[in-house]
Amino acid sequence: MDNEMISALDIIYPRRCPVCDGVIKVFEIRNGHLRRGGYIHRGCAKSVKIVRGSTCMKCGKPLGRSSTDEYCSDCVRVQHIFDRGFSVFEYRSISGSVYRFKYLGRREYAVFYAAATKKLLGDRLKVLGIEAVIPVPMYRGKERKRGYNQAAVYAKAVSKILALPYRGDVIARKRDTVPMKELDATGRRNNLKNAFNIVRNDVKFKCVLLIDDIYTTGTTIDELSRVLRVAGVERVYFLTIAIGRTT
Ligand SMILES: [Zn+2]
Ligand SMILES: [Zn+2]
């Protein structure tokens, strides 16, 4: 048996695979021993692509195996306000999973995402001197309607597994914003103008890790970074579950 406790909840609400959404057995026989089922079907684990190889030194986007570039095409054009980004999965290989995590209540996937985060990036994140793990905030009305903020669910799981302090009370989203995918670059920036504010005036962090589900253009992370820098934060890193390939 694993040393992890089997909770009654696991039997009443069986854990689901973050890739195919099928039920994962609470127990399975492995090497002749009864073991607790994992977080993902072993076959499904093979279809998920981890971000590896050379990545953009700014946003962390995979650059392709043969690339000798230091930055992706986006980061060559745009002066980002954050310091450096990290992501765990290539977006296309996990998009369905992230969709269910975000919109269909599959909060349990966070445990798998966080475990994969620790395995891939734990050592690198640990040495950055992060004083607070901060989720990209959701507008309160929207969060009430959806029931949870997926970035906060992932951030809490990361904070726990990496033993870094979680701070969901630092920044708030003052108003709802138009979905970013409906806007061009200028529209995206204008859409976020004054959307966030620091809600604690006793914040004295020098180094923080912002957390979101997906990294696309970085407009949201940049705007949050700007607000944090104004408040005196010196280094702003971000971490997302998934990131797209460079275009
Ligand atoms: Zn599966
Ligand atoms: Zn980049």
Image (cartoon, rainbow, N blue to C red):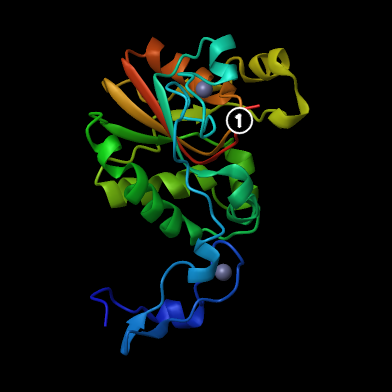
Quadrant of the frame with the N terminus: bottom left
**What residue appears at the point 36 percent right and 14 percent down from the top-left corner?**
231
- Where is residue 100? Give x, y as percent: 63, 56
Question: In the picture shown, does residue 159 fall above or below 180?
Answer: below
Name the residue that disc number 1 marks: 216
**The quarter of the displayed image where residue 27 is located:** bottom left
Question: In the picture shown, does residue 158 fall above or below 206?
Answer: below
Q: Is mark 1 within 8 Å of ligand 2?
A: no
Question: In the picture shown, does residue 157 fall above or below 25?
Answer: above
Residue at far right of view = 182
Q: Amino acid at mark 1?
A: Thr
- Where is residue 124? Give x, y as percent: 28, 36
Residue at far front of view = 66
Closer to the camera in the image, 209 or 60: 60
**What residue appears at the point 49 percent right and 82 percent down from the top-left corner?**
12
**What residue appears at the point 46 percent right and 14 percent down from the top-left corner?**
81
Q: Secondary structure at mark 1?
A: loop
Closer to the camera in the image, 18 or 170: 18
Quadrant of the frame with the C terminus: top right
- The answer to whether residue 79 of the structure is visible from this angle is yes
**The quarter of the displayed image where residue 200 is located:** top left
Question: In the picture shown, does residue 173 fall above or below 36?
Answer: above
- Where is residue 115? Give x, y as percent: 37, 55
How busy is the neighbourhood of tag 1: few (under 14 within 10 Å), some, or many (20 plus)? some
- Where is residue 28? Give x, y as percent: 41, 84
Closer to the camera in the image, 63 or 97: 63
Please indicate whether residue 60 sits to the left or right of residue 161 in the image: right
**What residue appears at the point 49 percent right and 18 percent down from the top-left corner?**
71
Number of numbered tags placed on the structure image: 1
Please indicate whether residue 204 sits to the left or right of residue 29 in the image: left
